[in-house]
Amino acid sequence: MAENRKRFLQGNEACVEGAIYAGCTFYAGYPITPSTEVAEGMSVRLPAIGGKFIQMEDEIGGIAAAIGGSLAGLKSMTATSGPGLSLKQECIGYACLAEIPLVVVDVMRGGPSTGYPTGPSQSDIMQAKWGTHGDHPAISLTPSTVPEIFTETVRAFNLAEKYRTPVMVLYDEIVGHMREPITIPATGELEVIDRAKVTCKPEEYFPYDDRYLVAPLAPFGSGYRFHVTGLNHKQDGFPTNDSKMIEANNLRVMRKVEENAGDIWKNEEYMLDDAEIAVFTVGSTARSARFAVNEARKAGIKAGLLRPLTIWPFPDKTVKELSKKVRAIIVPEMNLGQMVLEVERCVAGGCETEGIHRVDGEPITPAQILDTIRKYK
Amino acid sequence: MSTAVTEKKQKASVPFDYNKYLRPNKLPHIWCPGCGHGIVLKAMLRAIHESGIPKELICMVSGIGCSSRTPGYVDFNTLHTLHGRAMAFATGVKFANPKMKVIVVTGDGDALAIGGNHFIHACRRNIDMTVLVFTNATYGMTGGQYSPTTPMNAIATTSRYGNIEPPFDTCEMAKASGATFVARGTAYHTIELEKTILEAIRHRGTSVVDIIDACPTYFGRANKYKSATHMMEAIEKDGTVNIRQAEKLPPEKLEGKMLRGILHRVEKPEYCDQYESLIIGKAAKK
């Protein structure tokens, strides 16, 4: 690592640096606002370390090539925004079922449709979980600052490689385009996880070996010849119509995330110890929320902030516990109500809940949040 | 000379061991009686054998459809992807590991309709991969709908009154898109097909082989061909002419016939080579 590790970076640039730090050597994507700087940065950084960058003909080609790159053994990534994420959804489902490690960055802009390309939004929260058809595991990380985009991108690669599944880094246009000071960690300072190596003989290798929850994945071309398909398959990777096997495999794929939620969850709790009113939010909205909580405290209101850095799997237990301690949970989000539905589900009537929603392309202000906090004083 | 003749005789007398390249426990295949896909598969395996490329370094990629089931039956690194996306996945594999020989097995619907964009751009990049398009003018897997190569007026389950969409010429499109090797073969001319596929595999750059391989179950029955063999003769034998023979024939004899053989072959810089020598080189100097 370079001597001068202190930098002043844009969020999307921090994503590039995080990916390089994590060992990403393959990027395929398609330009889309407000994520384009990720592709531009990767096109400069990857060749310099002998890595591969390719701009594909469309969004689908971008993720498809990234899956191919991952199968050939390279840590792979693609980046996009809402409309592109819609196009990539079939391939995301493929990577879930075929269990291909992959990082998908989604810099959220206003929607639906082409919407407001340069305006911030948090309207892909549910798309990140439910965008592809069929039941599937989902991991999505939600950084809120430029340094966090770096660390969460590293964590996304780690989780993708560890659990052989696509992982999304989900942040809004504000965090993607803002500039902040960042100290790039020295090599070894952050944990970097590589996918498990295959040690058995080629003739004994099963790409979906059911003795494992997460079987090791051999790279194509390494002498382990196997089959990969998006059809429901057996442990040897070949398609099956056996209903018992189909169910067992579908459940195992879900269990990879369910049983490891403790390892995947990450929350920041701010002034929650004695809080009577909690704010639950992510991304740039969490920055407004922190300001509002500080202002509320100055006014003698016991407010606090629960900020998940992992939105999927949803922090069910933490929210449920919180609902036992506070009078109300306020959920500000730049959409018409997505995270608030999950909060309501976990709270199950245990405390008051209220969403603050905005879809005009403007950020949710601290004043908006503070006004709502005051209602529950 | 006598040694060469003996060797040739011996070679001919020893039957080709397809099992060396097949996954016998994954057979029987799903293809219908009378379908030419099995003939094409065998020609392809003989060509791969002749190329001498080790199995470990071959990656066979497909999309969705009847022909796209081929990778499941062969003992290579095999990747059965999504409908239309084979060439985009294949681009990723090849670019990530240029040592691999990537062969895409696809159908006309997979490659030219839903995957048309990936097809033309793979050709444009001239990335080293061999694309074998099994052209049967039908969506067989879904029950016989018309495809981008279905002839005008032909009957399909979605063109009961006759097809009004003009078909693509796969080879013209590949050539116009920048593919540096373009050829056509048929399941009927199996020896010629084997040689054509071998040349395609040996070519460095994007090589496309349009393989005319009619579907007896849907296309054949709907369009009143008496039998699979009758259809094969009418479409593949009588409906095509080798490019070398075509040079000697008057234009009226070529009307309505598709040309077979190597139709286009040029040497141009290959994508992965360009990336390695130009991009990586420049980035390293910076």
Image (cartoon, coloured by chain):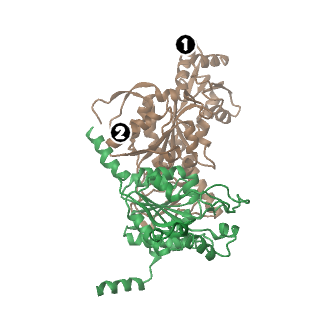
Chain colours: A brown, B green
Name the residue rendered at 58%, 65% in the picture: B256
Q: Are dots 1 and 2 on a single chain? A: yes
Q: Position of residue A106 (x, y in %)?
A: 52, 37
* Mark number, residue A45: 2
What element does badge 2 sit on? helix
Give the answer, above or below, for where B89 lies relative to A142: below
For the C terminus of chain A, which image quadrant?
Answer: top right
| Secondary-structure class at tag 1 | helix
Residue B134 or residue A181, whichever sits in front: B134
Give me the residue at 36% from left, 42% from top. Answer: A46
> Given the current orientation, which residue lies at the most extreme right position?
B161
Residue A26, compared with residue A366, is above or below; it is below
Q: Please name the amino acid that badge 2 sits on.
A: Arg
Identified by mark 1, the residue type is: Lys
| Foreground of the two, A357 or B191 | B191
The image shows residue B92 at horizontal and vertical percentages of: 44, 51
Query: Residue at (34%, 43%) from the top-left corner?
Result: A47
> Where residue A298 is drawn, which disc sits there?
1
Q: Quadrant of the N terminus of chain A?
A: top left
- Specify whether residue A350 is in view: yes
Give the crowd class for mark 2: few <14, some 14-19, many >=20 residues within 10 Å: some
Disc nearest the viewer among 1 and 2: 2
Asked if B265 appears above or below B33 in the picture, the reply is: above
Disc count in the image? 2
Residue at figure coordinates x 40%, y 66% from the top left = B199
